Amino acid sequence: MVRARIWIGLIAAVLALIGAACPAEAVSLWNSNVVGQNNTVGGSVTIGGLTIKVTSCTAKIGGSNLTTTLGGCGILNLQLITVAGTNPQIEILGASSGPIFSTANTITTATGSKISEGAGLDDLAIVLTITSSTKTVNNVGATLTGSVSGTGTTATKNTELTDISMGETIASASPSETGSISGLSLSSLPSGTYSGSVSASTALALPTASFTVTKDIRLAAPVGGVDTLVLSNVIQTYKTPEPASIALFLVGFGGLIAVRRYRRR
């Protein structure tokens, strides 16, 4: 019985190590916006049997559209990074682990003009295409992290928490499947908390191996300009049913071994 427990523990440890041992993969979310090539330069990563590729990207900074002339999404230098875990995850964040948006930041466009991210709405709209030949996904989750700080009043800060938000829609062709996450914002943090992470997820009725996720990540301008709003990062989680089934099988197998040894004794 004791040996069986040891084997079960070793198997669980090996599974954990397999998940943790996968090195992080990082690529540019969007390399550049070349006229006529807007949908050909998105980043692509592979994790947990899934290939995630950015197939479309548009952005607005300080209320101004980042046109191809200004440099488009590529001027933001955003990163797409794989995250080790029980289920495949990817993270979107700024260059050098910086934020996606911050009202304290000013960007320099391809033409040399400067735009303050606190001058108006900052908006990142991207389409992720997820494909796999070996895995299916039955649940898609999102985690949004950010903060509000400064000398604004409590009422002002509470309002500004709603300005750090995101939403997304999930769609697939075969099997036909849809889902959505809407209204995710920092306003769902506990009362009096002005930094942290919030999460939501949507279940897919049928496990799906090929689908798209259309994400809209938004940061509105602070009220009165006295606070700093930061949208730090967004993490996307894809739950695959197979690993859980394998783990359950191994635990059950370990139980059978234990019963067999017990009967022998």
Image: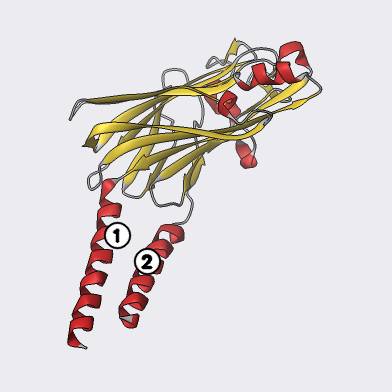
**For residue 162, which quarter of the picture?**
top right
Residue at point 22%, 88% (across, down)? 265
**For residue 5, which quarter of the picture?**
bottom left
Give the SS element for disc 1. Answer: helix
How many numbered discs sit on the rendered protein?
Answer: 2
Query: Does residue 79 appear in the picture of this structure?
Result: no
Marker disc for residue 96: none
Q: Mark 1 points at which residue?
A: 247
Marker disc for residue 12: 2
Residue at point 29%, 40% (across, down)? 137
**For residue 40, which quarter of the picture?**
top left
Above/below status of 220 relative to 94? above
Above/below status of 254 relative to 23? below
The answer to which of 130 and 205 lies nearer the viewer is: 205
Give the SS element for disc 2. Answer: helix
Q: Three-letter amino acid code at disc 1?
A: Ala
Q: Distance between the residues labelled 1 and 2?
A: 8 Å
User: Where does residue 64 sit, x and y in percent of width and height?
Assistant: 61, 11
Above/below status of 40 relative to 123? below
Q: Three-letter amino acid code at disc 2?
A: Ala
User: Where does residue 59 sit, x and y in percent of width and height?
Assistant: 53, 19
The answer to which of 138 and 215 lies nearer the viewer is: 138
Query: Does residue 90 appear in the picture of this structure?
Result: yes
